[in-house]
Amino acid sequence: MMRAMDRRRFLEAAAGVLAVGAAQSAFAGQAPPATAAPAAATPPPPRPAWSKKNTFKLKYAPHIGMFANAAGKDPLDQLRFMADQGFTAFEDNGMMGRPVELQQQMGDLMAKLGITMGVFVVQTGGNGNSGFTSGKPEDAGTFVKQCEAAVEVAKRVNAKVMTVVPGNFDRRLPIDTQTANVIDTLRGGADVFAKNNVAMVLEPLSDTPDLFLRLSSQTYMICRAVNSPGCKILFDMYHMTKNEGSMIPHIDLAWKEIGYFQIGDNPGRKEPGTGEVNYKNVFKHIHERMQADKRDFVFGMEHGNSIPGVEGERAVIDAYLAADAF
């Protein structure tokens, strides 16, 4: 028998399906055929026996797919499941590529559930070209337009921060010239974001040595030079433990310019407790600094699950409960 909570969600989904209108008859005076019945929505799977409302000290943000076995494939059902488990934030790198109608539905549901929207990625093409480092005016102009498009998405989903990656080195130019070009390009986007009370967060990465932005200190210097509330640091703890280590000291050095955190243990880029990082101590340190400085952050869970299936999803939640117990 369907539980009350599942019955509510089933009816809610079914009510949103548009009925098929009656077609006009090809013969004069003939009544139109009966309206087709709305297609039945697939209800989410029953909640696992371990499902419960947890309490977390920090705003950990799962992503679409992380709990797909327990919650079903529908992004809206996955958001409901996250809220049911006690998560108070959410991130979605691919939000800009989702249909506008779905963006609005997700934004409305997050507002209803009390979920804070974390980052989505500004679609700049920056991971595979030198559009930020080359200094070409047309590239800077394109970036401004991409930022303007991102602001419209942010309005639908109530986002305050968006990820930007400045792309690859331009091997033809000196490193300091490239840095100046990146700063100039980012200033145009920062102006767009600042006037809309949102910000881009620059993410140094470890994926390939061809990427221009790799260190938190380098990103800190660029943010100081851009000198705008519209440009901050995304401190991804997986990438930074690979590129520079000494995570807590580097967080302290970059603290004034950090706007967002992401999580992933190393090696493997899975949930806390599966690698070498002592996330319990890292979270405790950040939490203490947050309270002292009256700051708040979302912590994006940008990693995979170490175990497949529903049990792997339970393991992710248990890992965060353990790391959050400081």
Image (cartoon, grey):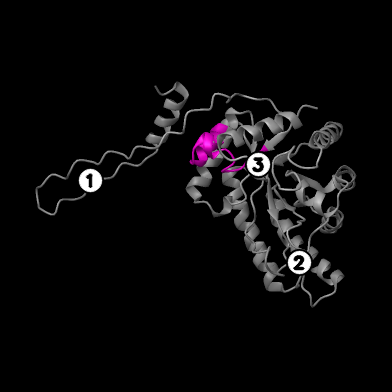
| Vertical arrangement, residue 249 with respect to residue 222, above or below | above
**Residue 88: in sight, yes or no?**
no
- What segment carries the magenta color? 61-81
Q: Does the magenta stretch include residue 231?
A: no
Judged from the image, the secondary structure of the residue bearing numbered disc 3 is loop
Rendered location of residue 228, percent (x, y): 79, 53
Rendered location of residue 16, percent (x, y): 40, 38
Q: Is residue 283 left or right of residue 49?
A: right
Query: Mark 3 and mark 1: span between their CA atoms?
Result: 50 Å
Quick one: quadrant of the C terminus? Answer: top right
Q: Is residue 20 left or right of residue 107?
A: left
Amino acid, disc 1? Ala
Mark 3 / mark 1, whichever is N-terminal: 1
| Vertical arrangement, residue 208 with respect to residue 267, above or below | below
User: Circles 3 and 1: CB distance less than 8 Å?
Assistant: no
Query: Mark 2 and mark 1: span between their CA atoms?
Result: 58 Å
For discs 2 and 3, the disc positioned in front in the rendered view? 3
> Label 3 belongs to which residue?
306
> Label 2 belongs to which residue?
210
**Residue 125: in sight, yes or no?**
yes
Mark 1 nearby-residue class (10 Å; few <14, some 14–19, many ≥20): few
Q: Is residue 69 magenta?
A: yes
Classify residue 225 by image quadrant. Answer: bottom right
